Amino acid sequence: MKTLAILAVVFAALGVLPLFVVSDVWLNSLIAVLYAALLGQAWNILGGYGGQFSFGHAAFFGTGAYTVAVLQVQYGINPWIGLVAGAAAAGLVAAFVGALSFRYGLRGSYFALVTLAFAEVLRILSNSVPFTGAGVGILIPLDPGAENLQFAHKSGYFWMIWAMALAAFLAAWWLGHSRFGARLMALRDNEDAARALGVSALRIKLGGIVMSGVFSGLAGVFYAQHYLYLDPGLAYGPAISVESLLVPIVGGMGTLFGPLLGAAALHVLSEVTRDIFGDAPGISLAIYGALLIFIVMFLPHGLAGLGRISARRLIRARPA
Amino acid sequence: MSEFSILLPSVLNGITTGALYALVALGLTLIYGVLHIINFAHGSLLMLALYGVYFLAAGFDIGPYQALVFMPAAMFAVGYVLQRFVIGKASHDRDENILLVTLGLSIVIENLALYFFRSDTRVVDTPWSFETVELLGAFLPLPKVIAFFGALATAAALWVLMTRTDLGKAIRAVAKERKGARLVGIDVDHVFAMSFGIGIACLGIAACLLMPSYYVTPQVGHGFVLIAFTIVVLGGMGSFVGALIGGLFIGVVESLGGLFLGESLGQIGIFAIFILILLFRPTGLLGHKV
Amino acid sequence: MILSVSGVSKSFGGLQAVRDASLDVEQGRIVSLIGPNGAGKTTLFALITGFHKPDAGRVVFNGEDVTGQAPERIARLGMVRTFQIVQPFAGQTVRDNIAVGAHLHRPARRDALRKAEEVARQVGLADRLDQDAASLTVAGRKRLEVAKALATDPKLILLDEVMAGLNPSEVRDVIPIIQAIRENGVTIVLIEHVMQAVMSLSEHTWVLNQGETIADGPPAELARDPVVIEAYLGHGMATRLAEEAPVA
Ligand SMILES: Nc1ncnc2c1ncn2[C@@H]1O[C@H](COP(=O)(O)OP(=O)(O)O)[C@@H](O)[C@H]1O
Ligand SMILES: [Mg+2]
């Protein structure tokens, strides 16, 4: 209950910020952080809580994005329906990938490679079939209005991503307070022991990947509606997969607030990088890569782990 | 034109490309066989080697085949250092951590290349870049034919190294039983770094053989990395023979896929093979260890 | 008969780990399985609980043929095992560890946590509920292993060397815990090397040697059985059995 209260306070605070923030620059920053936090929390549900490292979350993200875009552009279907359809389609792709991988007991590096390969297959397919606009990409016509899930003012997009991120964080909170979550984490920590206690590995992991996929798909829907343009490299490319895993790894895998911490830290880092190097191509990603290596080598519990260590040091230091 | 006259050049082309893929995959499979790690940075290290070949040619007028004197050694050093001081320190006993660190390395290498070299496509022109060899009525580019034999020679050399030398014996001992090897006084960390270095040295050779008929951009490694993984899982993780046969096979699949489905869709065949093998036969079709 | 194992065999490559093993366990009893290291005891547990598929033979639990079924399904039917090499959910608290078992028949988090506390009291871990499972002592980990299984409300529990590595006073503490489990109506199959425990706890013992069940009977009788002694127990073990027999 305590974590739920903290979660409520954090999101309430984020929610009132736009009332005071007038500058679009700041609002854009908030949107970017919440968007990355959503992407990261989606990965964290499967990777952090479930211990299944995906290298191909773009498969789910891109499916969400393309679904809402194609439904609008090719079939004239309202993006609110597209939002639901996008999340559902992403969940379906996740279920398919999960059913195949977990059914054959794929774990560790093999699972990572298979997810990566699925994302690549989808990228190539979306590059080749006509209804996604193939290599040219797909452009959603500009038509602002809440009924079209497009907003003339940034604050509309802020609320949209705020609500999506809140849903993902509530889901992650639930994992820490439910049978399903307990089982997911038990499988992560010791699969044999969990099965001996009646946990069905296949069913629970499937649940985990679908949940993860749905939120990743939602992030894709947001991306499509926000930028109104998609191409195969943007939607299914490796950059999304990398960002998805980098955010929670930096912030702290398997923790509720890790993805938010990671998203904020990476945002600050990328702003600082831009101040120093300008918009030179490559440099900010190179720093992300270096950070990934550094965190895995020295901070396996991410920034959240850093907090825990120093908190423990404080407690230990006091009586001395 | 008969069916045969379209198919044959395509197959032969596939085989020559496949030999190069095999060379890239040989390094990957050696590293997997000994260290049991999946080196995600393999593609970007190949890219680095290609830039090395390019700059030797552009800056010092050293042709790609003369570069064979320098590149394997240079790449060996890169590999040795990376394993000894970065990858080896990061595992904390989890496979996934190694995968993440090598992913991080690939991101760093690729984006530094992008920062320093920009995304221009660079080629090395040689007088014989466009010469062809006629074989069974098909015309094959000379550099690819040379690359084919170079790849076979490298594979043979690697085989001799692994089976006939003390280093090879130490590597095989470590691959089989790292605890036991440590007990009999083998410096396991050194052997790991040597193996990784040799695996990366293969990329140096591959780069020299590839450059005359290919190009380099910071992203060029992408195309190779999943292909190399496919070959390695196809041939059985850690199997040399498997990597060779798998490489040739994938080269032909890609070539025929491109012929029938078009360039971009043709690659799907490779991924389909990759996914199917990982799902149904993760030990590979020829589960033969180093 | 709550558990009936008949003619079960399993080989790993060339090694025949279990060969035509049979045993029948009556409801409400404590029985045991003894034999030298490598005799195939743990493998037999794994065959019974679905972690390995038998090459031949049948496992019937509570009237249902469960041969080759998934471990999670067998656990749901009421038969759970512990692991000789303890398998905690490292990084989670003792409370959360036990709750995983408690969730088997308790969907609500609160019920599972309450059950976890109750079981922790039963096995003497009540004061360590919030400790990280990885920080427990050997004795603590063995108790946790029992607690996780017990929290599933099993009908039959298979305990694999839960007293190995404990000192004599720790063993003395664990024995009444196991007796209490049986008094609550749970049938128990023990694998044990600690003869003191076998003699004082179990009513019937099977002797496994090189994968085969070579003898069975009351433990005190087995200790005098020359076939058992000659065939494999060796003199040291025979004397120990004889010395410890009066405890029973
Ligand atoms: N998964 C396995 N693969 C190969 N051999 C195994 C496996 N599990 C057990 N064994 C072998 O089977 C034999 C019996 O082992 P085990 O059942 O653990 O004996 P015990 O529990 O009686 O000490 C041993 O020789 C062991 O090495
Ligand atoms: Mg045993």
Image: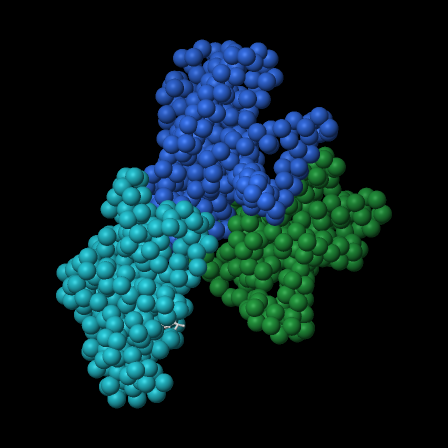
Chain colours: A blue, B green, C cyan
Q: Nearer the viewer, residue B36 or B242?
A: B36
Residue lying at 29% horizontally and 79% vertically, measured from the top left: C244
Visible residue check, residue A195: no
The residue nearer to you, when weighing C37 against A95, is C37
- A176 left or right of A305 in image: left
Report whether residue A53 is seen. yes
Does B95 appear above or below A98? below
**Nearer-the-camera pick, B175 or C36:** C36
Residue extending farthest to the front is A319
Which of these two is toward me, B270 or A29? A29
The location of residue A101, given as percent across then percent down, is 41, 48
Vertical order, B231 against A304 (above or below): below
Q: Quadrant of residue C215?
A: bottom left
Q: Is residue B281 above or below residue A277?
A: below
Numbered circles on residues, count: 0
- Left or right? Give the position of A192 relative to B54: left
Q: Quadrant of the C terminus of chain B?
A: bottom right
Residue in the image at 26% along x and 52% along y: C152
- Residue C240: name its quadrant: bottom left
Ligand 1 quadrant in view = bottom left
Answer with left or right where residue A59 lies relative to residue B144.
left
Residue A131 x/y as whole percent? 45, 27
x, y percent for residue C131: 43, 49
